[in-house]
Amino acid sequence: MKTRTWILIFAALLLVCLAAWFFLPKLLQTGSEVGIYQDGELLKTVDLSKVTATTTMTVSGSAGDNVIEISPGSICVRSAGCPDQTCVKHGPLKAGGTPIICLPNKLVIRWMQQAETEYDAMTGTEAAS
Amino acid sequence: MTKTRKLTATAILTAGALVTFVIESQIPSLTSVPGIKLGLSNVFTLFALCAVGTPWAFALLLMRVFLGGLLTGQTMAILYSLSGGLLAFGAMLLGRRLIPEKQLWVVSVFGAIFHNVGQIAAAVVITGTTAILYYLPILLVSAVVTGAFTGILAQLVLKRLRQSRFLT
C-alpha cells in the first residue's frame, strides 16, 4: 500500500480513539456513585453527592498503602506506597472522567454504571420501600 | 552474516536496548495515564528483526524484558512487558512479511498498537477489572504516534547502513 494510504488509516484511527477517549467515560457514567475495587472485588461504594465530611480510607496491598480521601463531591488518592505514583498524579475522579488505577496494588476507583446502580437499587433501597 | 557475527550483533543490540530501556524508565511520565512512553528500546528489536534475523530478535526481546525488569527493580512490570512484547513481536513478524522495509514505520506502528493491547490485556487479567479498558483509546493514540517515531528511526538507520554497505 502507498504511504499516503497508511497515513490516512492511522489518522482515522487516531480520530476514533480520541473521540472514544473523550466521550466513552461520559456516556457510561450515570450517577454520583463511586465504587472502590481491589483485586476485582468491590470494597466499598460511596455516593459522592451524599458525603458531608472529609474522611480517609486506607487500602493495603503488596506495594504499600494507598490513602484514599473522600470529601463532598470528590474522591482522590492522597498518597501511595509505590514508586510511580500514577494514581496520586491522576488527581480527583472527574465527572465523566477515567478511573483512578493503581496497578501495583490492583486498586481501581471508578464511577458506577447504570446496570450496577439499578442492581443496587433493586437489592437495597428499592426493595425495602 | 556468519553465526558469530550474528551472535555478537545481537549481544551489542541487547546491551543497547537495555541501556535505552533503563534510561527511559528514569524519565518521569509526562501524563497521569499509566503505560504511556516512547518505547525507544523497540528500535533495537525492529533493527534486529530486519538486519539479524527472527530468532535473534526474539532472543533480544526476551533478554530485554527480563533483564530490563530486574535492572529497573519493577519485577511486576515484567508481566506487562512480556505480554505486550510477545504480542507486538507477533504483529511485527507478520507485518514484515506483508510490508516492505521502506515502510518499516508502519510495521512499528502495528507493533506499538499490539504492545499496548497486550499490556492492557495483562492489566485486566491481573487486576480483575475491565475498568482499565477506558485507557485503551488513549494508549492506542500514543501507540500510533510513538510507534511511527521509533519506526522511522529504525528505518533510517537501516537505510543508511545499507547505503554505506555496512549491511547487505
Image (tube, coloured by chain):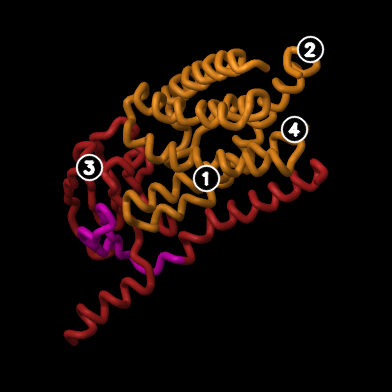
Tell me the quarter of the picture where residue B53 sits: top right
Left or right placement of residue A37 versus residue B26 in this view: left
| Marked residue nearer the N-terminal end (4 or 2) | 4
Q: Quadrant of the C terminus of chain A?
A: bottom left
A99 relative position to B7: left or right? left
Q: Which residue is mark 4?
A: B101
Q: Which residues are magenta?
A: A28-48
Q: Which mark is residue B139?
A: 1
Q: B51 or B83: which is nearer to us? A: B51
Please tell me if label 3 and label 4 are on a single chain.
no
**Front-most of residues B86 and B56:** B56
Give the mark nearer the N terminus: 1 vs 2.
1
Q: Residue furthest front?
A: B3
Look at the numbered disc 1 and give the secondary structure of its residue.
helix
Q: CA distance from mark 1 to mark 2?
A: 37 Å
Mark whose residue sits in front, 1 or 3: 1
Chief SS of the magenta region: strand
The mark found on residue A66 in the picture is 3
Instruction: Give the residue type that dot 2 points to.
Output: Ser
Question: Callout 4 environment at 10 Å: few (<14), some (14 to 19), or many (20+)?
Answer: some
Q: Nearer the viewer, mark 3 or mark 4?
A: 4
